[in-house]
Image (cartoon, rainbow, N blue to C red):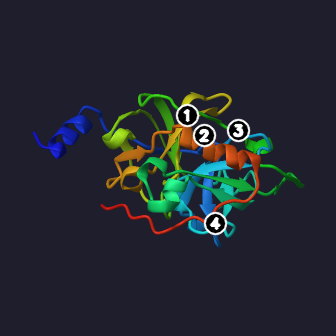
Amino acid sequence: MSTSAILLLSLAAHVLGQATHSKGIPSVGVLFSGNIQDHYCTASVIDSTHGNVILTAGHCISGTGKNLHFAPGYHDGQAPYGIYPVTAAYVHPNWNKNHDIEYDFAFLTLGEGKYDGKFVNVQSVVGGNKLITNGGHKYNVEVVGYNDKEQSPVQCRVDTYEAKAGQLGFNCGPFRGGTSGSPWIANYDSHSRHGSVVGNIGGWHTGGCTSGTSYSSHYGSGTRSVFDRANAGGHGDTVRGGASSGC
C-alpha cells in the first residue's frame, strides 16, 4: 500500500467535525498590520512572567514583527480588550534556516495596550494559557481561529491524532487562511476560558492543504527553549519569511 493510501486511511479514521462561528475566547485574537479588519493570522496569550507573550505560527512572521499588532478577543470590527504592539519575535534557529516544519511556531512579546483607560500588559486583562511541551499526540482540544475576511472566529472541540512526520493533526473545518497560529487548547475550562496549549495550526503544509484537516508541529524541548527566550525578553530575531505550503 502506498504512503498516500495509508495516510488517507488514517485520516478517514478521524471523523470530520464542523467548526461554528462563536464569540471566541478572550485570550485568542488576531494579528494585523494596518487595518484590523485585514487581519491575517491568529495568535494566543501564553502564561508568562511579565504577562506579555503570545504564540502564533512561524510562517506568520517575516522580519522583526514590529509592524504588527495583536487584538485579543476580536470580533465584528471591535477590540474589546485593547490592541497591543509587537515588540519582538522569537523563532527556532531551524525555522530561520530552512523553514523546518518541526518548528513552525513563533513567540512574540508585546508592549502595553490601553484597556479601561489604563496602559496594561495583555495577560492582566485576558489571562494566559499554559504551554505544554514534550507531551503526546492525542488530546481533546478547543481550537479557535480567524479565517481571512471574516470578522468573527470559528471554534471547534475535536480530538487530535498523530499525523505524518510526527506532527499533530485534527479534522474539523473550515479552518482556512488566517487561522494559521490558532492555538490547540487542551484541558479547556469553559468557566475560566483557559487551558493548556499543545499545538498551533502550522507545521506540515503550513497547517494543511484543505480547510477540514489541520496540523501542528509537535512541541518539544526546542519549543520550550524559544519560549524561554521570549519570556526573558531581550533581543528578538529577524525572521526569514516566504515559507511555502507546498500544496
Label 2, residues with CA under 10 Å away: few <14, some 14-19, many ≥20: some
Residue extending farthest right:
118
Where residue 24 sits, quadrant-wise, is top right
Return the disc, 4 or 1, that comes first in the chain's sequence. Answer: 4
Return the disc, 4 or 2, that comes first in the chain's sequence. Answer: 4
Q: Name the residue type under label 2.
A: Arg
- Residue sitting nearer the eye, 195 or 134: 134
Q: Which disc is residue 33 wearing?
A: none
Q: Residue at x 73, y 40 (%)?
A: 48
Q: Are marks 1 and 3 in contact (CB under 8 Å)?
A: no
Judged by depth in the image, the label closer to the viewer, 4 or 3, is 3
The span from disc 4 to disc 3 (Cα, nearest Å) is 24 Å
Identify residue for label 4.
Answer: 36
Q: Name the residue type under label 3.
A: Asp
Residue 145 lies, with reference to residue 60, above or below; the image says above
Q: Name the residue type under label 4.
A: Ile
Q: Which disc is residue 224 wearing?
A: 2
Identify residue for label 3.
Answer: 47
Taking the image as drawn, is residue 245 in sight?
yes
Q: Name the residue type under label 1.
A: Thr
The span from disc 1 to disc 3 (Cα, nearest Å) is 14 Å
User: Is 13 left, or right, of 125 in this rendering?
Assistant: left
Residue 80, image x and y in percent? 73, 52
Identify residue for label 1.
Answer: 133
Which image quarter holds the N terminus? top left
Return the disc, 2 or 3, that comes first in the chain's sequence. Answer: 3
Q: Are marks 4 and 3 in contact (CB under 8 Å)?
A: no
Which image quarter holds the C terminus? bottom left
Q: Are marks 1 and 2 in contact (CB under 8 Å)?
A: yes
Q: How many marks?
A: 4
